[in-house]
Amino acid sequence: MTAYDAVAGEYERGRPAYAEDAIACLMAEAGLDRDATVLDLGAGTGKLSRMLDAAGPAVVALDPSASMLAQLRAVAPRVRTLVGTAEAIPLDDRAVDAVVAGQAFHWFDAAKALAEIHRVLRPRCPLALLWNKRDEGDPVQMVLAELINPPERAALRGWELDIPAILRESGLFEQVKSFEFRHVHATDVEALVDRLRSSSYVAALPDERRHVLETRLRARLDELGSPRELAYTTLLYVARRRAVTSRRR
């Protein structure tokens, strides 16, 4: 069971998708078309998988949470779903034309996952990593950040990783490019409460503590006038599989 199994519905309702311009850029940079097969690692409820599916390629969505993948299958039946992890991908060598991960790479064991990604990618094919970076100048995002990342918690924020350095140092990927796209996510009070609940930190708290945080969020949102949107920046990194003569497995 993963941290998200119990909050799959909240994750689906409360989390944003990605900037449409980021997906268009990914498709162009990766050279993907309707004949391509894309593997989405840490796919969750399919926020990224669905956008890629709509753009044309065949999508395989992999996630350790069966509950999260059930949310995806309910709305995108064409997407193939697999329960598994990025460190042990249940696909053959050179099986896919691209690998993507949205809001997920920071949860992976980077060395093991990159070796597996390299294994399942066809030669010279791309890896794309995406995050929605919160705009913490946005007062609503500031409130969420205070509740989800209190001072006593050492928060893991994927967008703060030096992705180009991690990919280059692996020796498995090259030609790393990065892009940023402004993204606005429509929301409401109940969706924002679901966003709070879908945090791995909040989901793991006792019921009483979760209720305190939810009550605090509702009070702060009432002060802010029931916000209707959240500001994000979608970060996109694209790299190419490097040919190597040998590697550790």
Image (cartoon, rainbow, N blue to C red):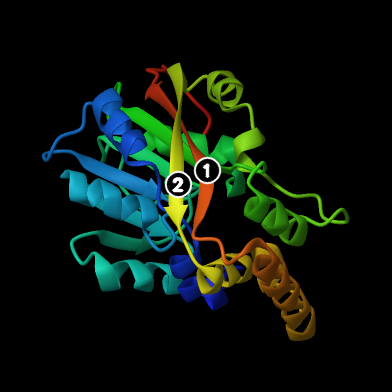
**Residue 204 in the image, given as x and y percentages of width and height:** 71, 72
- Residue 121 visible in the shown view: no
Q: What residue type is labelled 1?
A: Tyr
On screen, residue 150 versus residue 64, left or right, reads right
Q: What residue type is labelled 2?
A: Val
On screen, residue 1 versus residue 99, left or right, reads right
**Residue 33 in the image, given as x and y percentages of width and height:** 15, 35
On screen, residue 105 versus residue 136, left or right, reads left
Q: Residue at x 32, y 41 (%)?
A: 20
- Identify the element where label 2 is drawn: strand
Residue 245, placed above or below residue 75: above
Q: Which residue is at the far bottom?
A: 208
Q: Name the residue under label 1.
A: 232
Mark 2 or mark 1, which is nearer the start of the sequence?
2
Q: Name the residue under label 2.
A: 184
Query: Is there a contact, CB below 8 Å, between mark 1 and mark 2?
Result: yes
**Residue 64 in the image, given as x and y percentages of width and height:** 48, 63
**Residue 111 in the image, given as x and y percentages of width and height:** 58, 35
Task: Determine the image quadrant of residue 215.
Answer: bottom right
Q: Residues within 10 Å of mark 2 (few under 14, many from 20)?
A: some
